[in-house]
Structure formats: C-alpha cells, structure tokens
Amino acid sequence: MTPKMPPQVPVAVVGIGALFPASTGPAQFWCNVREGRDLITDVPSTHWLAEDYYDPDPAAADKTYCRRVWWAAARSAAWPG
C-alpha cells in the first residue's frame, strides 16, 4: 500500500512589486547606481525633525541613529491603491 499524496494545486505568480529610491522603476534605479548618484537624503523638515528622533547611540531607546533616508519616488498611476 502506498501513502496517499495530497492533490497538487497549480499556483501562478501574477505580479510583484518593489519600491526604488528616487526612481520610478528598476531601470531608472540601476541607471542611478551606474551613475553613482547618492540617493540618500536628509529628512525634510516638512516630514519630521530629525533632532527629535536622532541619537548617535544605536542602543538608545525609542531613537534612531540615522539622520538620512531614501524616499520612494512619487506614486504613478500604475501603482494600485
């Protein structure tokens, strides 16, 4: 007697998404990398004050030890939501 195998169900991957700093897609992102562009920027004061959250000690509670960030490009019409 052979053990009964569960039925196999076909699976299809229908999409994938990613965000790229200062880029609208992978092609622009890799172009930026090849050109050596610095895609990391200071946090704009319109978002938050970095001084309120920054501490150079990585072990500091409720703080970050980074002052610079990368931002995803503006949403395009192709992005859901």
Image (cartoon, helix red, strand yellow):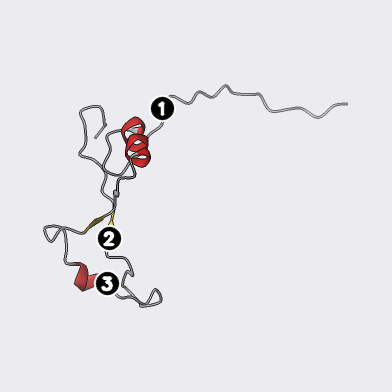
Q: Amino acid at mark 1?
A: Gly
For label 3, the residue is 54
Q: CA distance from mark 2 to mark 3?
A: 10 Å
Q: Could you tell me which secondary element the residue under label 2 belongs to? A: strand
Single out the mark in the foreground, 3 or 1. 3
Horizontal arrangement in the rendering, residue 59 relative to residue 53 (left or right)? right
Image mark count: 3
Question: Which labelled disc corresponds to residue 68?
Answer: 2
> Counting other residues with Cα less than 10 Å from the Cα at mark 3, is it few (<14), some (14-19), or many (20 or more)?
some
Task: Name which quarter of the figure residue 22 lies in.
Answer: top left
Question: Which labelled disc corresponds to residue 38?
Answer: none
Q: Amino acid at mark 2?
A: Arg
Asked if residue 79 is positioned above or below residue 53 in the image, the reply reads above
Asked if residue 41 is positioned above or below residue 36 in the image, the reply reads below
Task: Name which quarter of the figure residue 66 lies in.
Answer: bottom left
**Residue 10 percent coordinates (x, y):** 57, 21
State the quadrant of the C terminus.
top left
Q: Could you tell me which secondary element the residue under label 3 belongs to? A: loop
**Residue 27 percent coordinates (x, y):** 35, 30
> Counting other residues with Cα less than 10 Å from the Cα at mark 2, is it few (<14), some (14-19), or many (20 or more)?
few
State the quadrant of the N terminus.
top right
For label 1, the residue is 15
